[in-house]
Image (tube, rainbow, N blue to C red):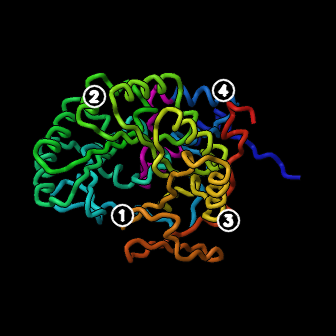
Amino acid sequence: MQMEEKKTTIREQALINQNFSILSSEEGLLPIKVSKFYKAKVDEEVLALGHTEGPLHRAVFPSKERITLRAPREKKDFVDDRENMQDDTHHSIIRKYEERILFLPTSNCLSNCQYCFRQDVLNEERGISKKISSLLEELVNYLNSHSEISEVILSGGDPMTLPFKGLKEIIEIIKNRTTVESIRLHTRSLIFNPSVFSENKMKLFGDYDIRLVSHIIHPYEICDVVKEYIEKLLNHNIRLYNQFPILRKVNDHSEVLIKHIKQLDEFRIRNLSIFIPDPINFSAAFRVRLSRLFSIIDEFNWNSPSWINSTRLVLDSVHGKVRREDLKSYDKENGIAIFERNGQQVTYPDLPEGMDDPGDLATLLWKDNY
């Protein structure tokens, strides 16, 4: 008979937080940072469960596993953003694709996600002031010398931490001084603090046809206040999208994925991708072994309609995103998967089977009384 795993108490969590603060300083991880708005949802979860191992808490506060669990062949930066940063752009332009670039005007976020794949770079940039005017001049010069680029993705950090004036300047300059056709903005602010979507920002996005891509990872992140702001964004004719990673003990169950993407669809948010977590340092607490991950996605596909399961399963890499369909070989015994994109191989070190302790559905969907 399997014994029930002991859950982390609030008192024990305080010590975990202290230990993580030391670890983050030593290892270059992002420190704990949680917005007041999101913490209220976390506190509700902790009160209901009686412990700190719920999905929302795990997303923004460290678990014991986060500190102690290490997988073989972890890296500081699996996607190697630095290799794709363009010269003389103050680390603000990343290019992996012929037709689009990432523009990083800020390294700030409203909260720090424990599973963040860009921890190394963001921690390195943290506290460095970036002057928008100089970054924009470099951006315009770069875009005008590369006319093949048709899309700019505003990322970071979180571009929604910028004031209205800064966002307006970025968007208007791209639209008026370059040949770029599309601007996409990626953010977690909708669930961390939706009030940053002020009326003037929403009007700006609507006027310039900005595609807004949220990174909502769990259905319980969408509360009544978030629903109100989703409706406001839709009323400004802003096209809404989402993408998120599959994370162990956060959303690693087909029923969670179905509920999540079905809810997004009801709010007219199109989910683009589900991401395989990067094998970066201290990420083992969130990773899912590929064989189980593929089984979860198969169950998700079999048990949901096409407008739900049309989302892609992808892995980010130094060469760009590769899909599950790009998997060329999978050596389960040695824990190595080989993907291929445009003739370039991507080697993914799998999570050892013994480390893949699945999330409990009763905890993952505690509001639904499983």
Please report contact status of discs 3 and 4: CB closer than 8 Å, yes or no.
Answer: no
* Drawn side of residue 255 relative to residue 135, left or right: right
**Residues shaded magenta:** 19-38
Per the rendering, the mark at residue 47 is: 4
The mark closer to the camera, 3 or 4, is 3
Q: CA distance from mark 2 to mark 3?
A: 46 Å
Q: Which residue is the site of mark 2?
A: 201
Quarter of the rendering containing residue 321: bottom left
Crowding at dot 3, Cα within 10 Å, few <14 / some 14-19 / many 20+, comes out as: some
- Dot 2 alpha-carbon crowd within 10 angstroms: few under 14, some 14 to 19, many 20 or more: some
Q: CA distance from mark 3 to mark 4?
A: 32 Å
The residues tagged by marks 2 and 1 sit, at their Cα atoms, a distance apart of: 32 Å
Three-letter amino acid code at disc 3? Answer: Glu
Looking at the image, tell me whether mark 3 or mark 1 is earlier in sequence order.
1
Q: Which mark is on residue 11?
A: none
Magenta span: chief secondary structure: helix
Q: Amino acid at mark 4?
A: Leu
Numbered tag placed on residue 353 in the rendering: 3
Q: Callout 2: helix, strand or loop?
A: helix
Identify the residue at the far front of this view.
306
| Earlier-in-chain disc, 2 versus 3 | 2
